[in-house]
Amino acid sequence: MKILVCISNVPDTTTRIKIAEGNASIDTTGIQWVINPWDELSLTRALELKDDKATGVSTVTVAHVGLPSSEPTIRKALAIGADDAIRVNAESSDAYFVAAQLAEVAAKEGFDMILCGIESSDFNGSAVGGMLSEFLGIPSVSGVSSITFEAGIPVLTREIDGGREAVTVPAPFVAVVQKGIAKEPRIAAMRGIMLARTKPIKVYEPVPVEALTRVESFEKPAPRPACIFVDPANPAQLIDLLKNEAKVI
Amino acid sequence: MEQKILKSGEFLTAETDPKDIFIPEEFSEEQRMIAQTCRDFLEAEVYPNMVNLEKGDRELMKDILKKAGELGLMGISIPEEFGGFGQSFVTQMLTAETTGAGYSFSVAYMAHCGIGTLPIMYYGNKYQRENYVTRLATGELLGAYCLTEPGAGSDANSGKTNARLSEDGKHYILNGQKMWITNAGFADTQVVFAKIDTDRVLSAFIVERIYPGVAVGPDEHKMGIKGSSTAQIYYTDVKVPVENLLGKRGEGFRIALSILHMGRLKLGANVLGAAKKAITDSVKYANERKQFGVLISTFGAIKHKLAGQVIRLFAAESAVYRASHDVDRMMEMIKGDCGDYGRTAIEAISHYAVEAALLKVYGSEMLDFVADEAVQIHGGMGYSAELDVERGYRDSRINRIFEGTNEINRLLVVDTAMKRAMKGEFDLFGKAAALWSDLENAASRAAEGEDYFAEKKRYISNFKKAILICIHGASEKFGKQLINEQEVLNNISDMMMETYVAESLMLRINKMESMGSGSAVYRDILDVYVYDAADLIRKSACDAINSFADAGMLPSLKLASEKLTAVRGLDVKDARRRIAGKLIEDNLYKF
């Protein structure tokens, strides 16, 4: 079984996001880029499945749509343990564009299980996984929090309202995974870091696809107003504030 | 283009081109990845366990060290043939820096990887390396280093631990006591220093914890680094196989000193990580805590502190990686002469003894300053044991004591540089005498059209001249007794530290600009640093001059020291506000 993990290159989660002049893009100066946390957990689970010989997972490949500047993030994935990587040489514009590019390379290379993080920590679109399965014409399961193998067949567990649902699905399929799929992201070991430079990164040029959306502008949320403390001995003030200021009662 | 390698201490008399130094902005992708692995490890394994580690859970510390070993973090300094990853000294220092944010874990880890493992790597024979180093490099074995004794601290050669050859010639029988041994509670191997028979000098032995007669005392109750095991170890008729003599008989003191040079350099890197953590904690708190209706990070007094932390750390970091790269280049240069990797590495490290001592003192005092300000910025909360800054404050203090006290190291900075010059490694005394003979014209004046860096270079060149004049005056006055004038040596040592760090900072920012990665805020850091350093150097020079100069020379020496430490006035308030501004905006240390 061959697994493909789709990875996105996102600003480190501690980054203070600045909007560039003109409000149409993010100022990327000084940003440290990392693997999208959901994708990193997907990769970790994929590697755990490969480590378990009973699953029959033979290779774990990562795929990314991005310019050469994103290669350090790809190499980090290789250092963590992915066997090889694919980069589609294009700036990722919107989810439709990214899904179309990923579908192209996935179809070309052929995978049995494709893992996508449920969202990315930059734009939180939550759309690539579903679109990718549509492009490929294969089933997708979303909100997957666990992947195990029973008698050689992958069992996906989904978080549903009030409980969990276990499903099986014929390969090939897309699993859109959420946090919980792996306990902690795997840390790149020294040996993995050394090996990463020898692992192949295949570069494909993008197929012509028009993005369906365009960012018009970004704006930051208004700063939170100061917290008002009400003396417990003065409930009338609380009622007044809720009624006249917050206007919730 | 060929790069020039300065000898240890030669910075006093030579100029360095920015292209000849290494700066952190040049870390490779692989080096950054290794550092990230260290950070990830601290986040995943160390910080969540810090409270239990501090309560003295030694098994937990052992487990965490083993996990670090599984990740390969214990093999960074070890060549591949002995199970490691053969990384450069710069990478080793980067690892030391990054793990330095790990509080007492860092102490245990560094003791294992450095003084616990490297004596065997550097001085061991093939059998010793294959038998011990390969297993220390993976964390299968954990190591300790046993030099200090109740009566032998700074005077390490006065130890009483004794080894005598057994009648059958197969063992050394070891008797004695060691104290302040890091990792004592669980270390499997100990590098123990002892005198064979009636030798006047030490020898070194590899002792296994399981040998009958080795007894470990209870852990000491310490002010800080409570998570690391520190105890006494007693040796009673311990039979150590003769093949476990490390190096040659009588080579122990040399091994001990060489390993201390290495430890001092690594400590210089280690404190950087701890300081970065303390600064990030400080700014995050300052950006959350409100008083008088506004964030305390908007107050000038807090900005002053935040900027002060950044300036000293950034400057220390510049000096640490400059020296680290010098070690790498020296290794490259001498490897043909030494042949063996281990001997090459320790020869190159030992060569930079002046810089090692200097960085140890400067770095440990930088961290104490940063950690102290971190507590102060947190106000009352900084005094609470719930916050990391309180732990950081306690843990910082030991750095001024171990790896040779700062008092010993201050003396070494000057004494070693002078000895190296006397051996003819560079011309210190000739240049010093020439300056002395023409004090009136000693200070370089501004050239017409002098640019920003030329001006800074001139200031630093003048600082160096002030040092040379003090070395000449003190040597003339005290002769061979100078070693007993510790206060004067301290004055000169302080001048040397400030100058080496200022020069490293200037070279770094110059190189950053040539790489296109500089910005105005880095010039602010350099401006404030040099402005402050000039004052410190002037004070130290005056103190030294007042101690050695006779009445006739005093006025001209004082005038010379004034001229040699004169720098342009600066609105330090605004410069510091700009530096703090970047820190506050980033909300973490990201310079």
Image (spheres, coloured by chain):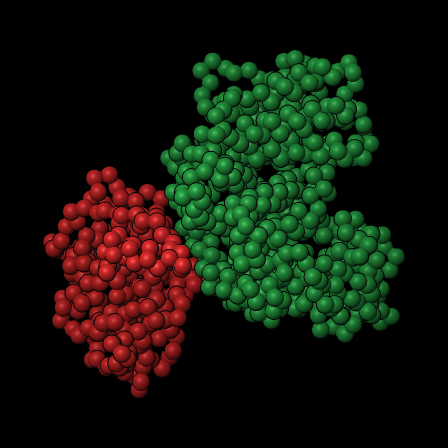
Chain colours: A red, B green
Which of the pair B51/A189 is nearer the observer? B51
Q: Residue B181's image quarter?
A: bottom right
| Relative to B379, B412 lies left or right | right
Residue B37 location in percent, x, y?
45, 58
Q: Residue at 38%, 42% (x, y): give it.
A: B585
| Relative to A209, B208 lies left or right | right
Image mark count: 0
Q: Residue at 60%, 45% (x, y): give it.
A: B368
- Quadrant of the snapshot with the C terminus of chain A: bottom left
Q: Is residue B530 above or below residue A205?
A: above
Residue B522 in sight in this render: no
Q: Residue at 32%, 52% (x, y): give it.
A: A11
Which of the pair B445/A141 is nearer the observer? A141
Residue B220 location in percent, x, y?
71, 62
Q: Is residue B278 above or below residue A121?
A: above
| Relative to B11, B285 lies left or right | left
Q: Residue A145's image quarter?
A: bottom left
Residue A164 location in percent, x, y?
28, 80
Residue B188 in sight in this render: yes
